[in-house]
Image (cartoon, helix red, strand yellow):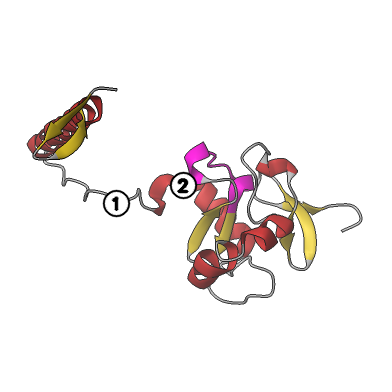
């Protein structure tokens, strides 16, 4: 690690160079997108909920009936929640829960340990198709066809 002094501050040369390259790459991408007529994405913004494939959205909505799948909630479902973190790029219907906005933001993400117990969050090493989730007061396994089956003893 090469460190130099600039204006009385220590600077990591390699890190500064990496930041410069990243800024240059973003600038080139922005120019290319504008040339194509595309609107540039705001810096720091996340990809919208459109990362779910349309068939998965339809199957999850059909399974939920348009109602939040958080146990006991009767609100209209508007968000699809990744049971296994979105960074794992698992966009199967077994990884999706159709939730109202409040339960997506505060119910599932608000109490992680309880969400793990209920199967609403799945650990990174596990397969969402093999981890039961609490739906309608029962522990069920979500199926690839958009349905579910009750876990024995649940």
State the residue in front, 5 or 52: 5
User: The C terminus lies in which quarter of the figure?
Assistant: bottom right
Quadrant hosting residue 21: top left
The residue depicted at 53 percent of the width and 69 percent of the height is: 106
Q: Which residues are magenta?
A: 86-96
Q: Position of residue 116 (x, y in %)?
A: 68, 55
The residue depicted at 25 percent of the width and 30 percent of the height is: 15
Mark number displayed over residue 52: 2
Left or right: 125 in relation to 136 = left
The residue depicted at 53 percent of the width and 47 percent of the height is: 56
How many angstroms separate mark 1 from mark 2 (CA)?
Answer: 17 Å
Left or right: 73 in relation to 86 = right
- Note whether 114 is above or below 148 in the view shown: below
**What residue is pinned by disc 1?**
45
Viewer can see residue 144: no
Q: Earlier in the sequence, mark 1 or mark 2?
A: 1
């Amino acid at each position: 690690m090469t460190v130099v002094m600039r204006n009385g501050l220590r600077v990591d040369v390699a890190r500064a160079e990496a930041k410069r390259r990243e800024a240059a790459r973003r600038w080139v991408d922005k120019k290319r997108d504008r040339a194509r007529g595309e609107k540039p994405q705001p810096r720091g913004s996340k990809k919208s909920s459109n990362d779910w494939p349309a068939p998965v959205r339809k199957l999850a909505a059909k399974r939920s009936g348009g109602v939040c799948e958080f146990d006991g909630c009767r609100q209209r479902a508007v968000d699809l929640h990744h049971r296994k973190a979105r960074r794992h790029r698992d966009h199967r219907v077994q990884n999706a829960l159709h939730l109202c906005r409040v339960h997506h933001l505060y119910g599932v993400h608000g109490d992680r340990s309880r969400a793990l117990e209920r199967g609403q969050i799945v650990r990174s090493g596990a397969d969402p198709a093999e981890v039961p989730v609490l739906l309608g007061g029962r522990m069920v396994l979500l199926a690839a066809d958009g349905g579910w089956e009750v876990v024995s003893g649940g």
